[in-house]
Image (tube, rainbow, N blue to C red):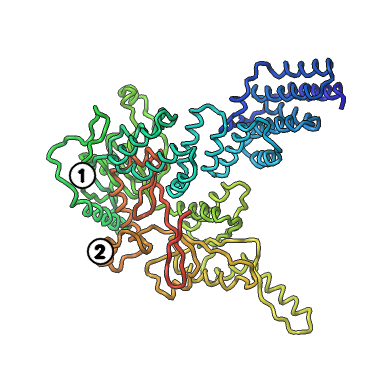
Amino acid sequence: MSFRLFVVCFIAILGLLSCTNSPNRQTTTATLSPSQNTTKVEKNSDDYLTQAKQNFVKNNNVYQRNDSLLQAAEALQTEGQCTKSIKMLKVLQSELKDNRHRTHGNLILAECYLILSDDAFDSVATILQNLTDDYGYQARIAALQAQLLVNTKQWLEASIALQDTDIEEREKTQNTWKWINKLDLPDLEKARLSETTLQPWLQLAIIIKRFALEPELFNQQLINWQSRHLGHPLVTNLPQEIKKLLQQAPIQAKRIAVLLPLTGRLANQGLAIKEGILAAYLENLPNAKFALNNAPDYDGSAGKTIQNKTQQYREIRFFDSALKTTQQLNEMVADFDVVLGPLVKEQIMKLTAVLPTDKILLALNRVELQPKKPNSVQLTQLVESDLTAPEHYYFALAPEDEAQQLALHIHQKQLVRPIIFAADNPTTQRMAEAFIAKWQETPNAIQPDLTIFTDSKDMRIRVSQMLDVTQSKQRIKQIEALSDVEVFGVERNRRDIDAIVLFANPEQAKLLNPIIEASLSPFARRSLSVFASSRSYSLDLNSNSLRDLRNLTFTDMPWMLPDHRWQDLANQTIQLWPEKQDTLLRLFAMGFDVYSLLPNLRRLKTLPQLVSHGLTGEINVDSEGVLYRRLLLAQVAQDRVKLLAVD
């Protein structure tokens, strides 16, 4: 292409772009923007275009012309005109004969793709795979690789790639810390043995996960860590959440009010939670001491917690919340500093609206959180410093959380096409919807097929239809009708699925699992994995029932599974309540964790990556005070249950 024709085409494109309106879409700012940090553009795009034309007319040098045009494309990116930059590069690509120019052009193209769209990762990955050499652009390539790795949640690899970028040191340190905190403790321990460049971040993350719930040990470990890494950006700019943690007083609950439905239709649930709270209270009582005065355990002037070997004695009182008005509930807790409960969502929402801000609330259910705005009267009565947010926490055994954890686990097992069988009731259907919603968050995920069954007869029909066994039988009959000889046929199931998910109770699962097993073809290359939630498991299942559930993988709280560390408590519970139902046992565990978590709620909220190991699972608290559980994975092996490693 002659330069005249090339310039005419290019000017025509820019002229067309300049006449168009700016798109309504707000451009997405990439996590990292290396081109803006590594390239100091003193001229604008028009200057470089003019320079390209003048140089080519003067000496007919194609290399210099293309170099100036690439700088023009770079300038357009810096000016926030990535759409024009991409248009220009598309025209220019066929003219780039030099490998260094092709690399430069592809990098600008990839960076602009990520700036303009959140769905461009596949295109950027293809561009990076086709680069033949870095030609001095190592830092920019590393920045793009880091973003690709973050998109696929490969946090350690992204942190490693980030170290090779030349973005501003403070931003690099903050992003590395954010990504490292996504790793679990075993992954951190493993990485610490091999990744020398990430030692400060890895060591601090390990200290937090190991010692953050033990303030005295944590403070000592932190001091040791700081002395080992003097001058490191992570030490000189300690993360804000750790600074807050060091200045934070733990919850010292002197008087606790517990609001539970102890009569009426929810009395059994309320009593089970009460028994769990009392069990945790009595377990801590031998190490408690009576407080003879109201002296605080936090020295505000020194900004540190005064450590005691024993806990303060706590006064705890239970109130029946059944059929109580909001005003009555508020009056009940007037003389208490911590409130546990209520259990009913409607009561929680009404109570949080009137509860004084100086009272700590740990509600026993989860509600839709709405930001509370003071009215005009309150604004005139309160100064800005008094408008503190109330300290509210929310703990629920939400079945949707289990469904979402199953979706993540199946995805991590690299299974791509699950199907779902759900019983016809509101809870299991909510779980199925939560599973599908979480599954769809994965890029390019195939939406799982969902089948709702009503009874055992309908269950068998649905399985045959969903696995295409019915169609296979029909094909065998057609062949028999067309053949003059006897046909021996074995039904075959569909081959495009690799996992089956059940949302059903134990009785339904005992019927459903053998039906699925019988419907699978013996000619399949591999057997289908079958997954379920805790709703499909019961401690009452005998050996024969467990055989019906063989190979079933399910989630459940540690309290309901073998080999947990609360065996003495479990034995006492069985002696006291030998006929206790599974649902009530799980609520007992919830009550135990509710009381045990109280001292650490603030620390857990300050550090969302931190977990507390309880009867109900690994518990963490988000920035809104909502508690989430991560359950254990187990599998039925013949007539017993074995624990699996959690991904």
Give the secondary structure at mark 1: loop
Q: Quarter holding the N terminus?
A: top right
The residue sitting at 23% across, 42% down in the picture is: 253
Kindly identify which numbered label has been placed on residue 309: 1
* Residue 605 x, y percent position in the rendering: 37, 40
**Total numbered circles:** 2
* Residue 245 x, y percent position in the rendering: 34, 35
The residue sitting at 21% across, 36% down in the picture is: 297
The extreme bottom residue here reads: 485
- Image position of 484 with respect to 557: above or below: below
- Image position of 465 with respect to 279: above or below: below
* Residue 526 x, y percent position in the rendering: 61, 66
* Residue 109 x, y percent position in the rendering: 69, 32
Kindly identify which numbered label has been placed on residue 572: 2
In the image shown, does 89 or 534 lie closer to the viewer?
89
The residue sitting at 78% across, 29% down in the picture is: 92
Q: Report, in whole angstroms, how far the alpha carbon at label 2 lies from the one at label 1.
A: 27 Å
